[in-house]
Image (cartoon, grey):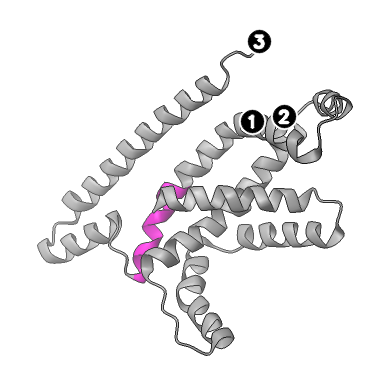
Amino acid sequence: MADCAALLGSALGFATMLAKISDSRLLRAAGFGFANLFRALPELLVILIVYFGLPQMLMALSGQRVEIGPFVAGVIALSLIFSAYSSEVFRGAWRGIPKGQVEAAMASGMGPWLILRRIRFPQIVRLSLPSLGNLWLVLLKDTSLVAVIGLQELMRKAQMATSVTKDPFTFYGTAALLYVVISIVSSAGLQAMERRSRRGLAA
């Protein structure tokens, strides 16, 4: 679930960042409004709104009953939350790109989209990796909240096992250990990605 939410959230966050830096006042207002909304709402509340509210909204629009499973609802909710925070990360990375590089690309005849693809995007990814890594670790922990809508993820299974065996220490302790292991492995992978992204750069 976390990987799906991170991928979707990163894509939506990048689109939100583009809206925030747009010349259009309407797009800027929409981008900042979206990001501020989902950064202000508690994660648990977003999950409940998506799981219970989104089907009713879709039914009102389509006139047909729409059901959203716990997994899909969890991915959507966590993607929205991740995108709100990642949009600020991407915006900071965008501002961190030297203006001289963009001006040189424009002088050589490159268009806006070619500059985005060849100049801006690779550097945005490199500059964003450390902060995105922190957001990823937070996202891993937030997946435990999806248990409230019935998804049998790690914490939900620990709760079910505890209710049967009456041995909370063993199962919650095991869940905690697994979260720590996943976080350590993720951190190592993210550090490797950061080192790889810096290859060829001047020290």
Whichever of labels 2 and 3 marks the residue nearer the N terminus, that label is 2
Answer left or right for 70 relative to 28.
left
Residues at discs 2 and 1 in contact (Cβ within 8 Å): yes
Q: Residue at x 39, y 54 (%)?
A: 1
Q: In this view, does 36 lie to the left or right of 78?
A: right
State whether residue 164 is above or below residue 99. below
Asked if residue 141 is among those painted magenta in the image, a careful observer would answer yes
As helix, strand or loop, the secondary structure at mark 2 comes to helix
The vertical placement of 165 against 51, above or below, is above
Query: Which of the two discs, 3 and 1, sits closer to the camera?
Result: 1
Q: Please name the residue that numbered disc 3 is placed on.
A: 202
Classify 10 Å Cα crowding around label 2: few (below 14), some (14-19), many (20 and above): some
Residue type marked 1? Pro
Name the residue carrying label 2: 119
Name which residue type carries label 3. Answer: Ala
Q: Could you say where residue 125 lies in the image, as x and y percent from the top left?
A: 61, 33
Residue 146 placement, left or right of 27: left
- Disc 2 to disc 3: CB gap under 8 Å: no
In the rendered image, which residue does mark 1 sit on? 122
List the single residue furthest toward the right: 107
Please name the residue shown 42% across and 31% down the image: 187
Say few, some or many: other residues with alpha carbon within 10 Å of mark 1 (under 14 / 14 to 19 / 20 or more). Answer: few
